[in-house]
Amino acid sequence: MQSLYLALEKSLLIARQVNGNWCLESHLDGLQVMCLAVDSSRPEHVYCGTYRRGLWRSEDAGRTWRPVGDLPMIPRDAKSIQYSNITAVAVSKKERAGDYGVVYAGTEPAAMFRSEDGGTSWQDLASFRELPSSSSWSFPPKPETSHVRCIAVDPRVPAHVFCAVEAGALVQTFDGGATWEDRVDGGPYDTHTLVMHPQAPDRLYVAAGDGFAHPKRGYQESLDGGKTWFYPDEGLCQHYLVSVAVDAGNPETIIVSAASNPQLAHDRLNGEATLYRKARNEHWKEITNGLPKAQGSMTAVVTATESGRFYLLSNHGCYYSTDTGLHWERLPLDWNKDLGHQHAQAIAVTGEK
């Protein structure tokens, strides 16, 4: 059975296809949803991060949920803080035999934690907060703090993990978080999404907010594991990027969600966001076939599943493409007015064949 996990600001929805029909379930009502992740080793294990209510786990493909163990209290500014704002979560493949993949949780204020038992107990990855650049991390709407925006695990090396702080740094660890390498000159400063591709070792794809201040830096790539970066932006007319996905069968086919600036990306009433696609030896091209108009749209989140197939979640609903993102179709889900005013946070798909 196919399941789609759809995280919006105030809703965690699960769409399931049973006997060719789609039904939509609502979970964690009343919580502010921030992020989600699926354990690829055991796809019935799903994690959802919330604001002020910590991390939640399902062991039955989202049918029931329970909060996992509290993250450690950490001294900060002469007092101890309980890190309950989970802003990013990722799960690596199993490093050894056991029931769970390693769970990485990122928070606001920016800190990183690791669990080897599905979130029952946690290890504070303290060296992350000791990076030289940490003193400059600051989120413009709340400049007194920063948060982990994105965590990406290398599909080939489970202990190799990238972490993006909004705003200030893209950093990485090669030993599961024991030690960290700081940001590099010329690298992304405001990474929103980073993905890797198993067929393209050391290639990093980044959708960033950097393009708001530096138009050529909305989309960024590295071919050497993050040591150096370049900015292929030919054809992009909107440079504030939020999400990126790469075709599972072809690392040259890339889709990004974009807006001209942060306000148009997130405005619930007057948003204006769109989608771009890039293939080998081509410039970026705006994609509109089957998608709602840019006017009234907040930036979407996109994901790639099997070869040629993408899914997209926006305030207008959930869409899919079976031809590498050229054409899209809306899933027949009951999308009420309240959902139309919520920003898409994350999407994950399981059960495809």
Image (spheres, rainbow, N blue to C red):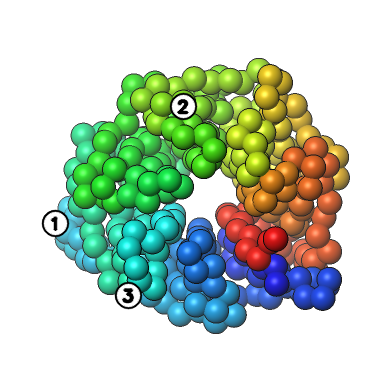
Q: How many marks?
A: 3
Q: Which amino acid type is marked by label 2?
A: Ser
| Mark carried by residue 78 | 1
Residue beneath the point at 32% across and 31% down? 183
N-term-proximal mark, 1 vs 2: 1
Q: Which residue is mark 3?
A: 120
Where residue 249 appears, as percent x and y from the top left, is 65, 41
Of 104 and 313, nearer the camera is: 104
Mark yes or no: residue 300 visible: no
Q: Is residue 21 above or below residue 169?
A: below
User: Mark 2: which secondary structure?
Assistant: strand
Where residue 18 appears, as percent x and y from the top left, is 77, 75
Q: Quadrant of the C terminus?
A: bottom right
Of 96 and 276, nearer the camera is: 96
Task: Count neighbours of disc 3 (C-alpha within 10 A) and say few if under 14, some if 14 to 19, many if 20 or more.
Answer: few
Distance in Å between CA atoms under marks 2 and 3: 36 Å
Mark yes or no: residue 154 visible: yes
Residue beneath the point at 52% across and 34% down? 200
Task: Count neighbours of disc 2 (C-alpha within 10 A) and say few if under 14, some if 14 to 19, many if 20 or more.
Answer: some
Where residue 319 appears, as percent x and y from the top left, is 77, 53
Q: Which amino acid type is marked by label 3?
A: Thr
Q: Is residue 277 above or below residue 56?
A: above
| Mark carried by residue 222 | 2
Q: Is residue 118 above or below residue 123?
A: below
Mark 3 and mark 1 residues within 8 Å of each other at the beta carbon: no
User: Mark 3: which secondary structure?
Assistant: loop
| Farthest-out residue, left | 78
Residue beneath the point at 33% across and 40% down? 172
